[in-house]
Image: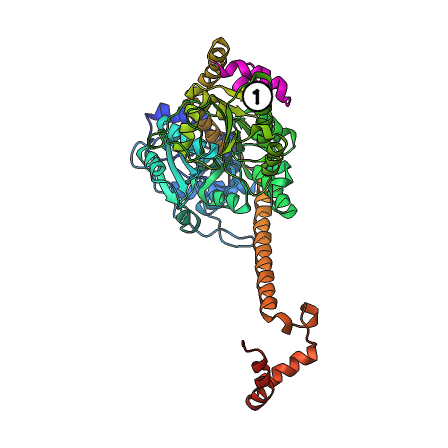
Amino acid sequence: MFSGRPRIGGAREAAGAVARLAGRGYPRISSIAGPCVYVRREAFELLGDLAGAGDLEGSLRELATRALERGMLHVAADDVYVGATGEPLEDPSPSSPILPGDSREPPAASLLDLDLGDETSAVRRALTTAQVALGGLSVTLDARALGPALGGTQVYTVELALALARLGGISLRAVVAPDLPSATAQALTDASIELVPYAAAAHDGLARSHVVHRPQQVFSADDVNLLRLLGERVVISHQDLIAYRNPAYHARLEDWQRHRRVTRMALAVADRVAFFSGHALRDVVGEGLLCEERAVETGIGSDQLWSRGLGCAQRPQRAPEGESYLLCLGADYGHKNRPFAIALLAALRELGGWQGSLVFAGAHVEHGSSAEEERAWRSAHPQLGGAVIDCGPVSEEGRAWLMEHARATVYPSLYEGFGLLPFEAARARVPCLYAPQAALAETAGEAAATLVPWDPRSSARAVLPLLEDGAAREAHLALLDQAARRRSWRDVAARMREVYEQAVSSPHRGGARRAWQELGREQQMVELSDAAASLGVKLRELQDSVGLLAGAEHGGVLTEAQRRGLLRVASRGFARRAVLGPISLLGRRW
């Protein structure tokens, strides 16, 4: 039952919108209320006529109560739009719920309040669906990843936000971190996206939007619990299972186990999970972490909507100038397989006499780095000399300069949930050397794949023709360009809007409530663990400050009786001067 005037089109269009977004249909409600009520003839035959003809509202309430007591059902026609011909009827004033054993007559408003107050109820879902159909969809993006560093996650977040804004029909806001760059903030603001500081989102009790979307996978219980504050329904984009499967990417075994627990619970509470590729989707479903019904492939656009507000390309320090080089972009995580790029360079020099160099540009990670293996490779191949250049992290201007001047990009990744680099290379008219591994085989395509996993000599033979101008290089670039043109951010945004609407209209799952409870317990475990660790640090600092005067059980030299004796002496003025005075002389510096 819906009242009020439609805010989109006329009554027919409104009814169509409601019917299109309606869920499974006709949710059960605990009572009936205006402005439009349909009572079946069979109900009158069983229950009798309306009582108190002078008071229609009271008569309907009494009829609803009798029907409920006889085991009948009331339903809301959630696929029907009811437009008020005059002013909409005012909603009944809220009343306190009727508790078991209460002798009061349960008024209709109280019973409906019980339905509406339960966020898992079907009628709550039906009313939210109607709100979306009549007034438009509201979405909050968890965009806290947007900071000074710019990687694939940041590019995806901004491009998706701008594409959704251009699509229209969605009220967008983004929760952002304090270090949001001004150029990024300006781009989002110009697109009429409301920016909400993280502190306000976490503590100020914002009104929840219809959907909250985290455009990257979660890493902590805090990440997921924040989502519950921001939206009625939850959508998460999940890139891959690399950190889920690899303990080397975590400081401790306990941290890895915690990450796995949080990942499982996040996938359990999400109403929909979006994936960049079919490969990543099948990987998570095959792991048993998600049912296919809630998994959706949305893809990534390869066109560029965001100018990023940056100036001209700038040459990074240590970057070679005036010579050919292969460019390997990305942090030195083990799965990025940077040592193979060194092996490829050695094979290119040995087989083809190519005299170019190899440039690494990316952060050095604390856990799971390939830095040691890279050093071992360079030591084992002294003939490379200074041909391997590590620029470390570079700015976006530096990244643009490196891409513009590279002879080719080398992308020897063992696993990617999508992989944007081939499309970035296509825009720059630079070959991208990759193997048909994981998602790259379906997104960039096997036809353009050049590396032979993982044979550096065979790969070098396939790569050499692409490093010279000619037909082979042009054919490779044409394949990359063809793959890139199949993917636009407009298509991604349209698909994502469908995902949001599916999340709104989908029924709540009983298992989700249990997963939310588990997340609460997980957060408590984290807080207790952090408190215990902090206490341990303070105890060690105290022991260190006491030093030799600590008890023998803590590494000191004094017995417990000696420590008590010193305490008694130190607490008495005369004894302290008489006993500790000579000791003080021994402690002086001469």
Name the spot of residue 365 as percent of width and height, x first.
54, 40
* Residue 567 to residue 10: above or below: below
Residue type, mark 1 in image: Arg
Quadrant of image for the N terminus: top left
Q: Work out which residue is located at the far left of the displayed protein and give it.
A: 86
Q: Residue at x 40, y 51 (%)?
A: 204
**Residue closer to the observer: 262 or 583:** 583
Residue 344 relative to residue 3: left or right = right
Q: Residue at x 53, y 13 (%)?
A: 465
Scheme by which the image is coloured: rainbow
Secondary structure under tag 1 reads helix
Q: Residue at x 33, y 34 (%)?
A: 187
Q: How many marks?
A: 1
Name the spot of residue 553 as percent of width and height, x first.
70, 69
Answer with the quarter of the image where residue 539 lies. bottom right
Answer with the quarter of the image where residue 558 lies. bottom right
Q: Residue at x 58, y 52 (%)?
A: 526
Q: Is residue 356 visible?
A: yes
**Residue closer to the observer: 153 or 549:** 549
Answer with the quarter of the image where residue 564 lies. bottom right
**Residue closer to the observer: 96 or 516:** 516
- On whether residue 152 falls in the magenta region, the answer is no
Q: Is residue 161 visible?
A: no
Q: Magenta stretch?
A: 444-468
Name the spot of residue 171 as percent of width and height, x first.
37, 34
Q: Which residue is mark 1?
A: 349
